[in-house]
Amino acid sequence: MSRVFNFSAGPAVLPEEVLRKAAEEMMDYHGSGQSVMEMSHRSKVYDAIIKEAEADLRELMGIPDEYKVLFLQGGASTQFAMIPMNLMKNKKADFIVTGQWAKKAWQEASKYGDAKKIASSEDRTFCYIPDCSDLPVREDADYVYICQNNTIYGTKYKELPNTKGKLLVSDISSMFLSEPMDVSAYGLVYGGVQKNVGPAGVTIVIIREDLITDEPLPGTPTMLTYKTHADADSLYNTPPCYNIYICGLVFKWLKEMGGLTVMKSRNEEKAKILYDFLDSSRLFKGTVDKEYRSLMNVPFITGDDELNARFVKEAEAAGFVNLKGHRSVGGMRASIYNAMPKEGVEKLVEFMQEFEKGNSHV
């Protein structure tokens, strides 16, 4: 069977070149006589893999020397607790809630201190990003938290909020490495890799060194203290070795493709093809205010639940899989991450045009 076009929001499509390389090296990595899946994380061979992965990521993102890169486990959701445990010194944090994941992060932080929603787009089902130019950021807030690209709702911050000098913390899970970003604008930035970077099981945290503390909140477990992992170069315990290796192959692929500036223009081109069709379609409609549209996640609807279900079913039969929208919002969603080829988006639009013709009576 030929490969399908996989529009899943995560775990998501990986570059074919990376999968082929991993397959080549599966039984014998670089003459070691073993798979990366089997080797000790304390071995010299694996040490070189994780160090090279970090060096390539630093180069791709232009990560300043005073930031630590941590390869962690527990998914991005564990960061909802780990961040307040390590950063909430005044027991106060301000949240801009633009979707499900920011809302969950706010709810989790509320267990550790005074987590305050200072802006939200929940009033219109998170279809926009609120004005963040003059927010009521508290003078004694430890940080301001955002989710920069909202996977479920398909919105993205086009510019960072004015935090009035306070630390900015951002979840970038679904836009990780999709475009250049200024890491120095953040105190901490993190993401689960399973959307745009690698296989599920790794969360990458990029944290400014002065925020890594000996004294997290009382009762913080050793494994949930950033210093534990920073001091051990992400090797305090057995890391998700194979998944980090795959991330490293993706970093190399991105470098070969020309880096993040090239990826951004590729992603803009793909997104334009799909959004232009949605804007002209009589049947399909995007659900996000145009000025806040994500390049990565594109939700859309027909306005009829039965028709939505039929579209998803027929699309899957035609080789376009995982187009069903998140269970909390319904409809459809096409996630068009770095590894989705332009051809996949073009063929999806062709299929949508044919489906529209066949359902013009609706």
Image: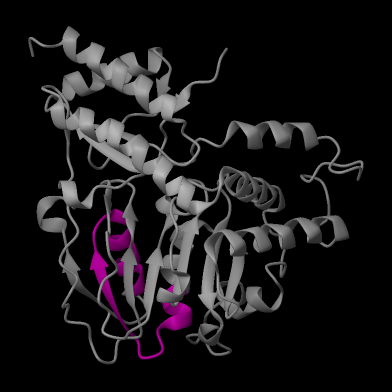
Q: Is residue 289 visible?
A: yes
Which residue does the image show at 54% across and 51% down from the upper left?
259
Q: Who is closer to the viewer here, 184 or 231? A: 184
Q: Please state the total of marks drawn on the protein image.
A: 0
Judge from the rendering whether residue 145 lies leftward or rightward of residue 124; answer left or right: right
Which residue does the image show at 21% across and 23% down from the upper left?
308
Against 34, residue 362 (above or below) is: above
- In percent of width and height, residue 180 lies at 45, 58
Which residue does the image show at 83% across and 50% down from the upper left?
39
- In percent of width and height, residue 131 lies at 15, 67
- In percent of width and height, residue 229 lies at 64, 73
Q: What colour scheme does the image use?
A: one colour
Against 67, residue 130 (above or below) is: above
- In percent of width and height, residue 87 lies at 44, 82
Judge from the rendering whether residue 25 lies leftward or rightward of residue 298; answer left or right: right
Q: Who is closer to the viewer here, 241 or 174? A: 174
Q: Who is closer to the viewer here, 313 or 151? A: 151
Residue 104 on the magenta span = yes
Looking at the rendering, in which quadrant would you find the C terminus?
top left
Against 172, residue 274 (above or below) is: above
Residue 5 on the magenta span = no
Question: Start and end of the magenta stretch?
Answer: 83-109
Which residue does the image show at 56% across and 82% down from the upper left?
209
Q: Where is residue 346, by image quadrant?
A: top left
Against 108, residue 22 (above or below) is: above
Looking at the rendering, in which quadrant would you find the N terminus?
top right
Q: Is residue 127 visible?
A: no
